[in-house]
Image: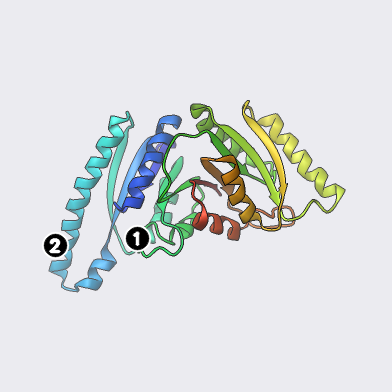
Amino acid sequence: MDNRTIIYPTDLSACAENAMQYVIAIAKAMKCKVQIVYSVDVSNIVKLDENPVRVMEEIQLQEGKAKSSLRKIKLKMEANHIVCKTEILKNPGISWLPEYIEKQKPYLVVMGTTGSGSLEKNLFGSNTYRVITKTHFPLMVVPKDAIFKGFDKMIFATDFEKKDTENINFLIKIAKHYKAAIDIVNVTETEFKSGEEKLYADNLKNELSKTVRYGKLDYKSLYWNNVDERLEILLKESNADLLALVNRKKNFIDRLFHKSIVKKMVYRTKVPLLIFS
């Protein structure tokens, strides 16, 4: 796959349709192509009717409906001067997406999420987090109630890892298109416990300052006994349009980005999340 391609998985639900506005926005900003992909849930069809003839007929019927719907999505993309392709797969259940992403190696994946407690048993229910944990490519999840109004403020939550420079530069490419400000924020449950740890964080912050070039960057350190709660408050206070997180394992300095924080934010956020692995 062209490394400037965005994968847009859809189950043709309202949630997926809402995510499309962000697909268009990011594709225009990053000058990317879009791969629209839909999968017919073969296992669900078999559960309803084991007769092989009727199963094949139902699969063909769903494929026909999907082709019509994907054609309409493609026309909307092309109306925005975006080059795109469509693909219909036949897979059991929803387990196909992580493997598909890893095989295609996209620039970015954009998909919807219904959050926790949703009764919708589709691609974008509680399974969103499983997709996040199994892919190694940037993934934007869009809450079903998010409304695209452009990007004015973005927040990148970090513990000042040196390798975050690559992720921040990725975010800057989007920000430049919309002239958006980016707050690089370190949130910890307690203040640094030693001078050595403080020096470590400061050195990483200085490294970011040397390698990242963008005039609308601001650095902040915040202390709160509940990290995900503080992030939610920060999003409201700043009226941010996007929160970027890194999904990596927890260690002594890496307090923020262990999986529980990412999972909580996926289920609770009201703004899109851009998740790096």
The percent position of residue 61, horizontal first and vertical second, equals 16, 57
**Mark 1 vs mark 2: which is more N-terminal?**
2
Q: Residue at x 33, y 31 (%)?
A: 82
In this picture, residue 35 sits left or right of residue 133 = left
Q: Residue at x 69, y 35 (%)?
A: 208
User: In the rendered view, would you say 157 is above or below 78?
Assistant: below
Q: How many marks?
A: 2
Q: Kindly identify the amino acid type of the residue bearing the numbered disc 2.
A: Glu
Disc 1 to disc 2, C-alpha distance: 22 Å
In this picture, residue 21 sits left or right of residue 220 = left
Q: Choose top left, top right, bottom left or bottom right for residue 259.
A: bottom right
Quadrant, the N terminus = top left
In this picture, residue 2 sits left or right of residue 159 = left
Q: Which residue is mark 2?
A: 57
Colour scheme: rainbow
Q: Which mark is residue 122?
A: 1
Numbered disc 1: secondary structure: loop
The percent position of residue 89, horizontal first and vertical second, equals 28, 54
Q: Kindly identify the amino acid type of the residue bearing the numbered disc 1.
A: Asn
